[in-house]
Amino acid sequence: MELTDWKNLPFGYIKTDYNIRCYYRHGNWGELEISSDDHLNIHMAATCLHYGQQAFEGMKAFMGKDGKIRLFRWQENARRMTRSAEGIFMAPFPEDLFKKAIEKAVLLNRHFVPPHGTGAALYIRPLLIGTGAEVGVKPANEYMFVVFVTPVGPYFKEGFNPVRIAIEKDSDRAAPLGTGHLKVGGNYAASLRGIMKVVKAGYSSPMYLDAKEKRYIDEIGAANFFGIKNNTYITPRSDSILPSITNKSVMTLAEDMGLRVECRPVEVEELESFEEAGACGTAAIIAPIGEVHDLETGKTIIYGKDGKPGPVSTSIYKKLTGIQFGDIEDKFGWMEIIG
């Protein structure tokens, strides 16, 4: 497939040439296999289909102006996938094999990596599923690891422009002491109700509150929330929030820029006090928030008066993407050139 309109890529699936697979059987992981098939053949009683034994990661590969492909903090994704696997009793995938699988998937599909300067990237999706057949509720004895890639544009159609967010109180994406801190499919299934509700109402994504009290900010759909005020970067801390690798990186950048960083419970009532607000994650990178609307009360909070991203969000976004695309010195050692 020949792609030419790189700057207008959607965030969606475009078929590429190859994916990588590996199987866990008899207590061991096998060798990496290359496949050109984008379908999986699994047993109808596989635990991933019935009991939610499924975890995944989201990563990106970036083309530098030097023509070299860069991976962003892949070790963090490997470790997070291990935590997810252990959290729902799956066989963890070894970190060394994770790296080899990611590299193979990217380099075999090298011509799908969007050119430097287009703002697009190659999205990488590692997937771990229980494939062993079980009818009783228990962990599988067989697993499958897959990596596929696809070129993507911005997660939000607005790109790096303010998005409109709606507070969702009628559903929860994760329960206290549940799996909210793991990157497993069930959390995203639980978020669909809220996502479809707010999209229908004309908003980009829901702002979920804590399931127990509906008092504290949880997540923005599939991204972490942050607010800026008094030269401080503030982001919620909760056991039901997925630890974002992008957010972790942004906190480092914020401190490097001279901002204080606070990771703490953030009450929804605090929204009015922020000078800027945004969402961050691998898919979205940084999405500045221009409006937060409470569907229940009708109250709306507006950030900025000119419809443009705030200065702090803009600076962080430029620094992070500059590092990812190799345009700015990577003094943190986040990027790894693979080819």
Image: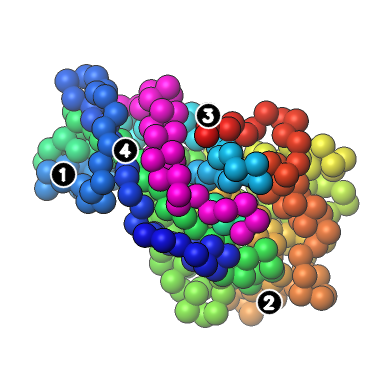
Residue drawn at the location 58% of the way across and 39% of the way down: 68
First of labels 1, 4 by sequence position: 4
Question: Magenta span covers which residues?
Answer: 91-118
First of labels 1, 2 by sequence position: 1
Q: Which of pointers 1 and 4 indicates the residue nearer the eye? A: 4
Which residue is tagged 3? 75
Which residue is tagged 1? 42
230 to the left or right of 201:
right
309 to the left or right of 134:
right
Q: Which of pointers 4 and 2 indicates the residue nearer the eye? A: 4
Q: Which of pointers 1 and 2 indicates the residue nearer the eye? A: 1
Asked if the residue at tag 4 contacts the one at tag 3, i.e. Cβ–Cβ closer than 8 Å, the answer is no
Q: Is residue 105 magenta?
A: yes
Within-10-Å neighbours for mark 2: few <14, some 14–19, many 20+: few
User: In the structure shown, which secondary structural element does the residue marked by tag 3 occupy?
Assistant: helix
Q: Which mark is residue 20?
A: 4
First of labels 1, 3 by sequence position: 1
In depth, the one of 50 and 21 nearer the eye is 21
Location of residue 9 in the rendering, given as x and y in whole percent from the top left corner: 51, 65
Separation of disc 4 and disc 2 at Cα? 48 Å
User: In the structure shown, which secondary structural element does the residue marked by tag 4 occupy?
Assistant: strand
Residue drawn at the location 71% of the way across and 30% of the way down: 332
Within-10-Å neighbours for mark 4: few <14, some 14–19, many 20+: many
Residue 217 at least partly seen: no
